[in-house]
Amino acid sequence: MIFLRSLLFNLYLVALTSVLGIGGFAIRWFAPHRALAYAQFWAGLLLAGLRRICGIYPVVSGAEHLPPQGAALLASQHQSAYDTLVWLTLLPRPTYVMKRELVKIPLFGPLTPLAGMILVDRGAGAGALRNLLRDTARAVAEERQIVIFPEGTRTLPGERRALQPGVAAMAAQARLPVIPVATDSGLRWGRRAFRRVPGPIHLVICPPLQAGLKREILLAEIQKAWDEAPLPRCG
Protein backbone atom coordinates (compact mmCIF):
# COMPACT_ATOMS: atom_id res chain seq x y z
CA MET A 1 0.00 0.00 0.00
CA ILE A 2 2.82 2.44 0.82
CA PHE A 3 4.36 1.72 -2.59
CA LEU A 4 1.11 2.44 -4.44
CA ARG A 5 0.43 5.61 -2.47
CA SER A 6 3.99 6.79 -3.06
CA LEU A 7 3.64 6.11 -6.78
CA LEU A 8 0.38 8.04 -6.93
CA PHE A 9 1.92 10.98 -5.08
CA ASN A 10 4.94 11.05 -7.38
CA LEU A 11 2.62 11.14 -10.38
CA TYR A 12 0.67 13.96 -8.72
CA LEU A 13 3.91 15.84 -8.01
CA VAL A 14 5.07 15.62 -11.63
CA ALA A 15 1.67 16.53 -13.06
CA LEU A 16 1.10 19.47 -10.69
CA THR A 17 4.60 20.84 -11.13
CA SER A 18 4.38 20.53 -14.91
CA VAL A 19 1.04 22.31 -15.16
CA LEU A 20 1.91 25.10 -12.73
CA GLY A 21 5.41 25.31 -14.13
CA ILE A 22 4.01 26.05 -17.57
CA GLY A 23 1.70 28.59 -15.97
CA GLY A 24 4.81 30.12 -14.45
CA PHE A 25 5.77 31.54 -17.84
CA ALA A 26 2.90 34.01 -17.47
CA ILE A 27 4.16 34.95 -14.01
CA ARG A 28 7.67 35.54 -15.34
CA TRP A 29 6.50 37.67 -18.26
CA PHE A 30 3.54 39.59 -16.88
CA ALA A 31 3.51 39.43 -13.07
CA PRO A 32 6.98 38.75 -11.63
CA HIS A 33 5.90 40.40 -8.37
CA ARG A 34 3.52 37.45 -7.88
CA ALA A 35 6.26 34.81 -8.06
CA LEU A 36 6.39 34.20 -4.29
CA ALA A 37 2.61 33.87 -3.98
CA TYR A 38 2.63 31.48 -6.94
CA ALA A 39 5.32 29.34 -5.30
CA GLN A 40 3.32 29.30 -2.07
CA PHE A 41 0.23 28.21 -4.00
CA TRP A 42 2.19 25.35 -5.60
CA ALA A 43 3.68 24.23 -2.28
CA GLY A 44 0.27 24.35 -0.60
CA LEU A 45 -1.29 22.11 -3.25
CA LEU A 46 1.68 19.75 -3.15
CA LEU A 47 1.60 19.31 0.62
CA ALA A 48 -2.17 18.97 0.59
CA GLY A 49 -1.73 16.11 -1.87
CA LEU A 50 0.98 14.60 0.31
CA ARG A 51 -1.40 14.61 3.28
CA ARG A 52 -4.34 13.19 1.35
CA ILE A 53 -2.48 10.58 -0.69
CA CYS A 54 0.31 9.50 1.66
CA GLY A 55 -1.05 10.49 5.06
CA ILE A 56 1.94 12.72 5.85
CA TYR A 57 1.21 15.94 7.71
CA PRO A 58 3.12 18.53 9.78
CA VAL A 59 3.01 18.87 13.55
CA VAL A 60 4.48 22.21 14.54
CA SER A 61 5.50 23.14 18.07
CA GLY A 62 7.15 26.30 19.34
CA ALA A 63 5.41 28.64 16.89
CA GLU A 64 5.36 31.25 19.66
CA HIS A 65 9.12 31.66 19.10
CA LEU A 66 8.52 33.15 15.66
CA PRO A 67 8.12 36.92 15.55
CA PRO A 68 4.51 37.88 14.73
CA GLN A 69 5.70 39.92 11.77
CA GLY A 70 8.82 41.26 10.10
CA ALA A 71 12.22 39.78 9.39
CA ALA A 72 13.47 36.56 10.98
CA LEU A 73 16.35 34.12 10.52
CA LEU A 74 15.61 30.40 10.88
CA ALA A 75 18.36 27.73 10.98
CA SER A 76 16.66 24.46 10.11
CA GLN A 77 17.79 20.88 9.96
CA HIS A 78 17.54 19.46 6.45
CA GLN A 79 16.59 15.81 6.00
CA SER A 80 14.11 15.89 3.14
CA ALA A 81 12.72 17.78 0.18
CA TYR A 82 9.80 18.40 2.51
CA ASP A 83 11.90 20.97 4.38
CA THR A 84 12.19 23.08 1.24
CA LEU A 85 8.42 23.13 0.79
CA VAL A 86 6.84 23.43 4.20
CA TRP A 87 8.07 26.93 5.09
CA LEU A 88 6.39 28.29 1.98
CA THR A 89 3.12 27.36 3.70
CA LEU A 90 4.04 28.31 7.28
CA LEU A 91 5.66 31.74 6.88
CA PRO A 92 4.10 34.84 5.32
CA ARG A 93 7.12 35.96 3.24
CA PRO A 94 9.76 33.22 3.30
CA THR A 95 13.14 33.41 1.62
CA TYR A 96 15.26 30.28 1.26
CA VAL A 97 19.04 30.26 1.03
CA MET A 98 19.62 27.86 -1.86
CA LYS A 99 22.19 26.73 -4.40
CA ARG A 100 22.30 28.90 -7.51
CA GLU A 101 22.29 25.86 -9.78
CA LEU A 102 18.69 25.15 -8.74
CA VAL A 103 17.70 28.03 -11.02
CA LYS A 104 18.41 25.62 -13.90
CA ILE A 105 15.59 23.28 -12.88
CA PRO A 106 13.05 23.36 -15.73
CA LEU A 107 9.87 25.41 -15.34
CA PHE A 108 10.06 26.42 -11.66
CA GLY A 109 13.78 27.13 -11.39
CA PRO A 110 13.69 30.52 -13.16
CA LEU A 111 10.99 31.68 -10.74
CA THR A 112 13.26 31.38 -7.70
CA PRO A 113 15.10 34.69 -8.09
CA LEU A 114 11.81 36.44 -8.88
CA ALA A 115 10.40 35.04 -5.64
CA GLY A 116 13.26 36.68 -3.74
CA MET A 117 15.22 33.55 -2.88
CA ILE A 118 18.84 33.99 -1.82
CA LEU A 119 20.99 32.18 -4.37
CA VAL A 120 24.48 31.04 -3.40
CA ASP A 121 27.17 30.23 -5.95
CA ARG A 122 29.38 27.81 -4.04
CA GLY A 123 32.16 28.15 -6.58
CA ALA A 124 32.43 31.93 -6.31
CA GLY A 125 34.74 32.01 -3.28
CA ALA A 126 34.76 35.29 -1.36
CA GLY A 127 32.32 36.74 -3.86
CA ALA A 128 29.72 34.22 -2.72
CA LEU A 129 29.90 35.55 0.84
CA ARG A 130 29.63 39.16 -0.32
CA ASN A 131 26.56 38.32 -2.37
CA LEU A 132 25.07 36.35 0.52
CA LEU A 133 25.43 39.31 2.87
CA ARG A 134 24.06 41.74 0.28
CA ASP A 135 21.01 39.56 -0.30
CA THR A 136 20.57 39.06 3.44
CA ALA A 137 20.41 42.82 3.92
CA ARG A 138 17.88 43.06 1.09
CA ALA A 139 15.70 40.33 2.61
CA VAL A 140 15.75 41.98 6.03
CA ALA A 141 14.82 45.34 4.51
CA GLU A 142 11.88 43.61 2.80
CA GLU A 143 10.86 42.04 6.15
CA ARG A 144 11.30 38.51 4.83
CA GLN A 145 11.68 35.39 6.96
CA ILE A 146 14.99 33.79 5.92
CA VAL A 147 15.33 30.00 6.07
CA ILE A 148 18.83 28.54 5.91
CA PHE A 149 19.96 24.92 6.21
CA PRO A 150 23.37 25.15 7.93
CA GLU A 151 24.17 21.48 7.30
CA GLY A 152 24.54 22.41 3.64
CA THR A 153 22.84 19.27 2.32
CA ARG A 154 20.20 16.75 3.27
CA THR A 155 21.24 14.48 6.13
CA LEU A 156 19.88 11.26 7.56
CA PRO A 157 17.90 11.31 10.82
CA GLY A 158 20.41 11.26 13.65
CA GLU A 159 23.35 12.11 11.36
CA ARG A 160 25.53 15.05 12.32
CA ARG A 161 27.56 17.26 10.01
CA ALA A 162 29.81 20.23 10.64
CA LEU A 163 27.63 23.31 10.22
CA GLN A 164 28.49 25.80 7.51
CA PRO A 165 29.52 29.23 8.84
CA GLY A 166 27.33 31.21 6.46
CA VAL A 167 24.53 31.37 9.00
CA ALA A 168 26.82 33.18 11.44
CA ALA A 169 27.78 35.77 8.81
CA MET A 170 24.11 36.26 7.98
CA ALA A 171 23.19 36.67 11.66
CA ALA A 172 25.88 39.32 12.07
CA GLN A 173 24.70 41.13 8.94
CA ALA A 174 21.01 40.97 9.86
CA ARG A 175 21.53 41.67 13.58
CA LEU A 176 18.76 39.17 14.24
CA PRO A 177 18.52 36.30 16.70
CA VAL A 178 18.81 32.89 15.08
CA ILE A 179 15.83 30.57 15.52
CA PRO A 180 16.89 26.88 15.37
CA VAL A 181 14.38 24.41 13.92
CA ALA A 182 14.63 20.65 14.45
CA THR A 183 12.74 18.14 12.31
CA ASP A 184 12.33 14.42 11.70
CA SER A 185 11.14 14.77 8.10
CA GLY A 186 13.62 12.12 6.92
CA LEU A 187 11.58 9.44 8.69
CA ARG A 188 8.66 10.05 6.31
CA TRP A 189 10.30 11.33 3.13
CA GLY A 190 13.86 10.11 3.00
CA ARG A 191 16.74 11.51 1.00
CA ARG A 192 16.36 10.30 -2.60
CA ALA A 193 13.72 7.82 -1.35
CA PHE A 194 10.74 6.75 -3.43
CA ARG A 195 8.62 5.65 -0.46
CA ARG A 196 6.60 8.15 1.56
CA VAL A 197 5.81 6.70 4.99
CA PRO A 198 2.48 7.78 6.53
CA GLY A 199 2.53 9.75 9.76
CA PRO A 200 3.44 13.14 11.22
CA ILE A 201 6.49 15.21 10.40
CA HIS A 202 7.48 17.15 13.50
CA LEU A 203 8.85 20.67 13.29
CA VAL A 204 10.17 21.99 16.59
CA ILE A 205 10.83 25.74 16.56
CA CYS A 206 13.33 26.34 19.34
CA PRO A 207 13.77 29.51 21.42
CA PRO A 208 15.77 32.18 19.58
CA LEU A 209 19.48 32.44 20.21
CA GLN A 210 20.57 35.92 21.15
CA ALA A 211 21.93 38.15 18.44
CA GLY A 212 25.64 38.90 18.36
CA LEU A 213 27.05 35.50 19.34
CA LYS A 214 30.50 34.66 18.01
CA ARG A 215 30.58 32.20 15.13
CA GLU A 216 31.83 29.16 17.03
CA ILE A 217 29.41 29.72 19.88
CA LEU A 218 26.46 30.27 17.53
CA LEU A 219 27.11 27.10 15.55
CA ALA A 220 27.49 25.09 18.76
CA GLU A 221 24.27 26.54 20.17
CA ILE A 222 22.34 25.72 16.98
CA GLN A 223 23.52 22.10 17.16
CA LYS A 224 22.70 21.94 20.86
CA ALA A 225 19.18 23.24 20.25
CA TRP A 226 18.64 20.60 17.57
CA ASP A 227 19.99 17.84 19.80
CA GLU A 228 17.80 18.84 22.73
CA ALA A 229 14.63 19.51 20.75
CA PRO A 230 11.71 17.35 21.97
CA LEU A 231 11.36 15.20 18.86
CA PRO A 232 9.90 11.69 19.08
CA ARG A 233 12.74 9.17 18.97
CA CYS A 234 10.92 6.62 16.88
CA GLY A 235 9.43 6.50 13.38
Image (cartoon, helix red, strand yellow):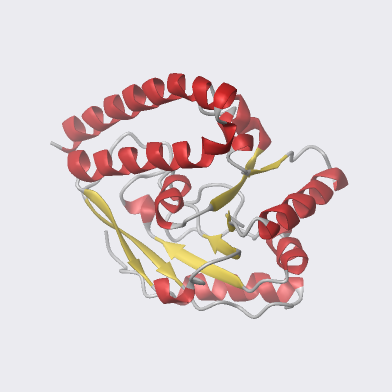
Which quadrant is home to the N terminus? top left
Horizontal and vertical percent position of residue 52: 19, 42
**Residue at left 61%, top 35%?**
114
Q: Quadrant of the C terminus?
A: bottom left
Q: Is residue 34 left or right of residue 15?
A: right
The vertical placement of 14 against 180, above or below, is above
Would residue 107 be visible to someone looking at this image? no
**What residue is at 48 percent from the left and 71 percent from the top?**
68
Residue 98 visible to the viewer: yes
In the image, 59 versus 42, the foreground residue is 42
Residue extending farthest left: 1
x then y, percent, for residue 110: 59, 27
Residue extending furthest toward the right:
126
Question: Quick check: 161 above or below 189?
Answer: below
Q: Where in the figure is residue 207, as x and y percent of width and height? A: 50, 78
Name the foreground residue: 18 vs 184. 18
